[in-house]
Image: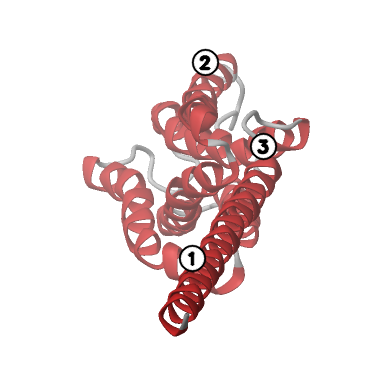
Amino acid sequence: MMGEEIMDVHRRDSSGSKTHDSLHENVEQRNEVGGGGIAAAATGGEQAQVSETPTLWMWVLTFVSGISGLLFGYDTGVVSGALVVISGDLGPEELSSQQKEFITAATSLGALIFSVFSGALADQIGRKWVIAIADAVFISGAIIQAAAKSVWVMVAGRFIIGWGVGLASLIVPLYLAELSPARYRGRMILINVLFITFGQVVAYAIGAGLTQVASGWR
């Protein structure tokens, strides 16, 4: 009798431990399933917050920031027509080759210098502010060029224009890349490139139209 009672006790202990183990495994499985569901829900929530297609506001910002590209193209293209008709408006009866080189290269030099600092400046004050500053610089340089009475004032105006070119050429594509969804990133950045080339075409057209106008280059 004692042996049978001992065997019954062992059976109860083993069955109880198996039951406890199975309950523990079920709890772990529920936790794993629940955690996976929560993770999936969290992942789904994050994905739901990211737009896969550009919103109307994204397109508006793309075209507005493209104004910098338009000014970039216009200011780099307009000088080719202006140098032909400037004649004696800047002092000398005829601009020398060296003076034309200074006027043309000043923009590239300004762009080279300011493109180095544009990234750090954008990190400090933000992309949109740098784009706004670039547009203001474009306008300031254009006013200086239009009012220039000497070669060196013209060179200074072209140099200031280069500041805007250096800022806009780096920050606008960067801003559009960060703004746009991944699938549309290339075509939204392409809009800025189209603005640049369109600005150059506009500059050539205006230069051709004002060729016969006195001081039309201004």
Q: Secondary structure at mark 2?
A: helix
**Quarter residue 27 falls in:** bottom right
Q: Secondary structure at mark 1?
A: helix
- How far apart in space, not on screen, are marks 1 and 3 (Cα)? 51 Å
Residue 179 x/y as whole percent = 59, 44
Colouring: secondary structure
Q: Secondary structure at mark 3?
A: loop
Q: Nearer the viewer, residue 116 or 78?
A: 116
Which amino acid does the dot numbered 2 rest on?
Ala
From where the camera sits, is residue 171 visible? Answer: yes
Which comes sooner in the sequence, label 2 or label 1?
1
Mark 3 = which residue? Answer: 51
Which amino acid does the dot numbered 3 rest on?
Ser
| For the residues bearing labels 1 and 3, Cβ distance under 8 angstroms | no
Q: Residue at x 50, y 39 (%)?
A: 72
On screen, residue 82 versus residue 206, left or right, reads: left
Residue 52 x/y as whole percent = 62, 32
Q: In the image, is residue 51 above or below residue 26?
A: above
Mark 1 = which residue? Answer: 18
Task: In the displayed orientation, state which residue is furthest to the bottom.
Answer: 2
